[in-house]
Image: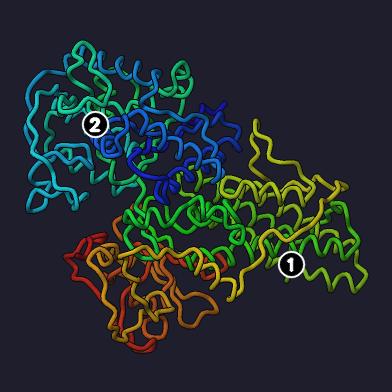
Amino acid sequence: MARPFYVTTPIYYVNDVPHLGTAYTTIVADALRRYHALRGRDARMLTGTDEHGLKIERAATAKNISPKAFVDEVSQHFRNAWPKLLCEPNDFIRTTEPRHEELVKTVWERVAKKGDIYLGEHEGWYCVGCEEFKTEKELLPGNICPLHPNKPTERLKEPTYFFKLKDYEQKLLDLYDQNPGFIEPESRRNEVISFVKSGLRDLSVSRTSFSWGVPVPGDPKHVMYVWFDALANYWTALGDLQKKYWEPNGEVVHLVGKDILRFHTVYWPAFLLSAGLPLPTKVFAHGFLTIDGQKMSKSLRNAVDPVRLAETEALGGPDGLRHQLLRHVAFGQDGDFDHKAIIERYNADLGKNLGNLLSRTLGLCAKNGLDKVPAYAPTDLEREFEKQAAAHIQGAANAWTELAPHRALEETYALSSLANQYVDRAAPWAEAKKGNQERVATILALLLEALRALSVLTWPAIPRKADQIRAQLGLPAIRLGEDQWPKLAFDRAGQALGTASVLFPTIDKEGEKALLDKLQPKPEGIEAPPTTTSSVPGHPSAAPTSTTITYDQFSSVDLRVGLVKTAVKVPKKDKLLQLEVDVGEEKPRTIIAGLALTFAPEQLAGQRVIVVANLAPRDFGKGLVSHGMLLATGPSEKLVLATAPETAAPGAKLK
């Protein structure tokens, strides 16, 4: 029997509102929980709020209320938001809860008993935004924290307890070496290893300059450093369930943003090693989201409310928002939440692909007088479909297991596309005209079975709509317990179908404009993003533009050196080549580029090119998805690629 699966989000700091970034992590965690529960595993999800620290104390003082009253109010906003996004965590932890405070004291006492905590004095530049002392090499000129440039660091000197982090330098390196999957993706693992190899310093783990925190056992003048307190939540929240869900009995996966990678992959495992507690199985760091090409600022966070987006039924409601975040953003990389792309992706995947398949299948059943699932008598055409469908179903399972929801959905919609293509090839309308009802029955039986499989494959991402698909097929809602992952079975002959209705109405140009006017943020002081006339990846327009951009807008573009490993022509597409490009990640990326009128495929292998690495994936149909764009200039038949010298390493960033 598979061991339990335990997935956690970061606990969100309550000086902020639930925004698109926090929604993203929470939705991914919920989708992973749902997938593993579908596979028959005991799957558990934790989220919550981080409620101690100097930031909170100052924010409460500014509002003239107590810190407890402040965190009670803001924490509730997070608790209320997640069900509206169809997220169903099994637990919601608050670091001000007695159950947490008592157990985090236990962790402290175990570390102290090991001899890894000592009293000293610390002086340095303190970033209130990060709740962390910074070294001078980490700061910009003027002692500015690069993560919080609008909040100058403060020079603090205070008595503090130190954790002997330096003693764990080699132990951590051994951990990373012996467990290469402990940190993912690989680029983040390399980043952490480089940081630890550069040398660790003992870590200040208490504060006396403020009082809003967990008192240190035996010395209440000190409160625990907020990160010592907060990181323990993943373990303390389990309480009596620790033996069931925590390693070695359970698989423990922490999902975090790349900005808090160090805390989770250096400090947290060091604390656990010191306390003699098992480590989590994996820490996966995802990238940042921009909004319509702009860095997510405080004003944009407030303007782009995920709950408001989830209430937009024209885009599929909360399912539509979940679909966009899971499908459109490659998990582990930076991504852009483009409002226009939401509509395009909704139309392409849900409206014209999955929704169209459901509507035309049930429409054909009604037209042929079928209100029950017909019998199945396959030919070679159906057997070929079954073989290809099985590959997509397995591919989706592999991707979910590998924490790649974007690839899981790519495989899922490839199956839906395959079924739409099958309808055209099998032509049931032509068979009906011939009076070949047995053949019509077989075609529709296959389509209904493909839709049954799709109702399961889509459930982790769009659970409400997936259950509605099942209702139209005459199937019950998903029942967890045993492994539900589909195999084409064709064992439903004679079972009644449900009532058909349009689940994903497509959005026309007029509707698109109305939605964009309603949803696109127009916060004060935010510049409009620059426009472009580029329409083919790999062939951006060379036309000059007078539009200016801010430095933040430019810095949001991830330009990297890419090494072209292979290049092949895309069948039936005169201009397109399919490239596999190494951009310094674990696997090369697939990039579809309009280069074929200038270059033969063999000319490109081995070229070092410039890649826009955080461009939203573009779906060309029939399973072709481009994950980046090459830079070039000139007309399609005389393109000149932007290239890099051979000394430039794949993945090196341009700046």
Q: Quadrant of residue 447?
A: bottom right
Residue drawn at 51 percent across, 54 percent down: 308
Q: How far apart are marks 1 and 2 (CA)?
A: 55 Å
Residue 468 lies, in percent from the top left, at: 71, 50
**Quadrant, the N terminus:** top right
Q: Name the residue under label 1.
A: 423
Residue 426 position within the rendered picture, expressed as x and y whole percent measured from the top left = 77, 68
Choose between 398 and 285: the one closer to the eye. 285
Instruction: Tell me: 51 left or right of 361.
Output: left
> Nearer the viewer's eye, disc 1 or disc 2?
2
Whether residue 264 is visible here, answered yes or no, is no
Residue at (41, 74) in percent of width and height: 537
- Please state if 399 lies on the left or on the right of 119 as rendered: right
Q: Residue 611: percent from the left, percent from the top?
A: 31, 68
Counting residues from the N terminus, which is met first, the one under dot 1 or under dot 2?
2
Q: What amino acid type is highlighted by mark number 2?
A: Tyr
Q: Does dot 1 land on a helix, a strand or a loop?
A: helix
